[in-house]
Image (tube, rainbow, N blue to C red):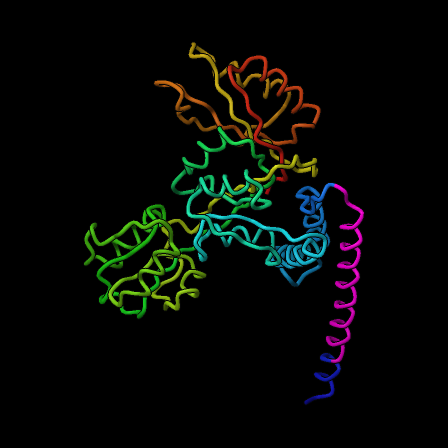
């Protein structure tokens, strides 16, 4: 070993020792904070968003901002666990993109609870069985997740955060010869996201050979029990069930992304870069939508999303899901919401939270 290499490794060893001492010191401060807090709430999305933004702004490289972000999410996750254990529900089983989203948002030092349906995620959080829930709300290719939107209309839960997760689909099987595959299991949305790739690369499969199942993790489980089957799922699902990768990143849109929401019972303070979600409806008359949105323009509030959804309360009655920039406590947003409340037939604020 050259002297130069030894010196560099000795320096790394010294830095590792310093890092260990600093992380331990941070963890001890977190434990002390846990003793001081009286609310019992350890997850502060606005505080964590500010820390992550600051670390990325000060990042000198060569590590990318995305990796710096995940590093500090893990550090904060470990420190949170010293304050108080945290549990998070997601749409299961293990190996789904929802589980991946939960771990990416909260870090690995949490207890994850797999639920059989989106309804169960809502119910589990509402009943205080877990602290938070993570649910998909929209996909950049396939659009809104209708069940999540319907439940947001009914639930007392508050949106505490959001997460944009790039969705990379893998073709997984016991072996890697495409010609030997005679059926594919996957969730309907994943099959739709990979429609062009599947038809181009597996032309011998008929439409009936594409089998819809409850989740991608369940697809991987079934493929693991059938030597002539494959699954379209995430990489983690393949690892959990011991499947080989036949092809990776087979989604038709390379920018395929799913947005997830974090649901809880706490109001979130302003972080400096926030989003507010709400649901509203108006009377069925000419120009009603224009008049309903007018307060946003008058108070300089930007709208990033507007989507209609049947209200399920009557024939041809609709509600509108709206995302706006800013926190509901911001002066201009608060003023716009007061006017909206006076004009809307129905208005429900789903929550304000750090924007990603």
Would residue 55 be found to the left or right of residue 262 on screen? Answer: right
The question of residue 156 being in magenta is answered with no
In front here: 276 or 147? 147
Which quarter of the rendered picture does the C terminus lie within?
A: top right
Image quarter (top left, top right, bottom left or bottom right) of the N terminus: bottom right
Against 282, is 234 above or below?
below
Residue 231 location, x and y as percent? 33, 59
Q: Is residue 17 left or right of residue 169?
A: right
Q: Is residue 246 above or below residue 154?
A: below
Number of numbered tags placed on the structure image: 0
Q: Where is residue 2 drawn, in percent x and y? A: 70, 88
Q: Which quadrant of the structure image shows residue 317?
A: top left
Type of secondary structure dominating the magenta stretch? helix
- Whether 276 is drawn above or below 355: the answer is above
Residue 41: quarter of image: top right
**Residue displayed at 69% across by 28% down:** 329
Among the 4 quarters of the image, the one containing residue 324: top right
The residue at the point 44 percent across, 39 percent down is 119
Residue 216, image x and y in percent? Answer: 38, 54
Q: Which residues are magenta?
A: 10-38
User: Is 168 or 318 nearer to us in this picture?
Assistant: 318
Residue drawn at point x = 54 percent, y = 21 percent: 347
Residue 22 is covered by the magenta coloring: yes
Q: Residue furthest top?
A: 285
- Outermost bottom residue: 1
Percent x, y of residue 320: 47, 24
- For image coordinates 41% across by 36% down, the residue present is 147
């Amino acid at each position: 070993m050259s002297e130069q290499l030894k010196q560099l490794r000795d320096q790394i060893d010294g830095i590792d020792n310093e890092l260990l001492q600093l992380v331990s010191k941070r963890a001890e401060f977190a434990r002390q904070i846990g003793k001081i807090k009286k609310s019992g709430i350890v997850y502060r999305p606005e505080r964590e968003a500010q820390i992550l933004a600051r670390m990325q702004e000060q990042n000198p490289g060569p590590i990318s901002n995305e990796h710096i972000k995940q590093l500090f999410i893990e550090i904060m996750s470990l420190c949170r666990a010293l304050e108080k254990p945290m549990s998070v529900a997601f749409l299961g089983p293990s190996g789904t993109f929802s589980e991946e989203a939960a771990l990416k948002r909260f870090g690995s030092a949490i207890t994850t609870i797999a639920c059989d349906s989106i309804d169960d995620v809502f119910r589990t959080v509402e009943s205080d069985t877990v602290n938070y829930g993570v649910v998909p709300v929209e996909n950049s290719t396939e659009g809104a997740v209708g069940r999540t939107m319907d439940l947001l209309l009914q639930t007392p839960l508050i949106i505490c955060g959001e997460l944009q997760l790039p969705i990379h689909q893998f073709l997984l099987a016991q072996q890697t010869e495409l010609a030997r595959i005679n059926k594919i299991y996957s969730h309907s949305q994943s099959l739709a996201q990979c429609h062009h790739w599947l038809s181009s690369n597996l032309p011998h499969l008929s439409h009936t050979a594409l089998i819809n199942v409850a989740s991608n993790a369940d697809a991987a489980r079934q493929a693991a029990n059938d030597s002539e089957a494959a699954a379209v799922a995430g990489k983690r699902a393949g690892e959990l069930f011991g499947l080989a990768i036949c092809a990776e990143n087979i989604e038709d849109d390379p920018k395929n992304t799913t947005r997830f929401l974090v649901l809880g019972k706490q109001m979130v303070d302003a972080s400096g870069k926030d989003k507010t979600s709400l649901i509203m409806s108006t009377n069925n008359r000419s120009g009603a939508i224009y008049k309903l949105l007018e307060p946003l323009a008058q108070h300089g509030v930007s709208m990033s999303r507007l989507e209609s959804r049947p209200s399920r309360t009557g024939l041809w009655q609709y509600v509108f899901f709206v995302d706006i920039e800013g926190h509901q406590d911001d002066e201009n947003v608060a003023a716009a919401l007061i006017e909206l409340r006076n004009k809307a037939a129905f208005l429900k604020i789903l929550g304000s939270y750090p924007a990603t």
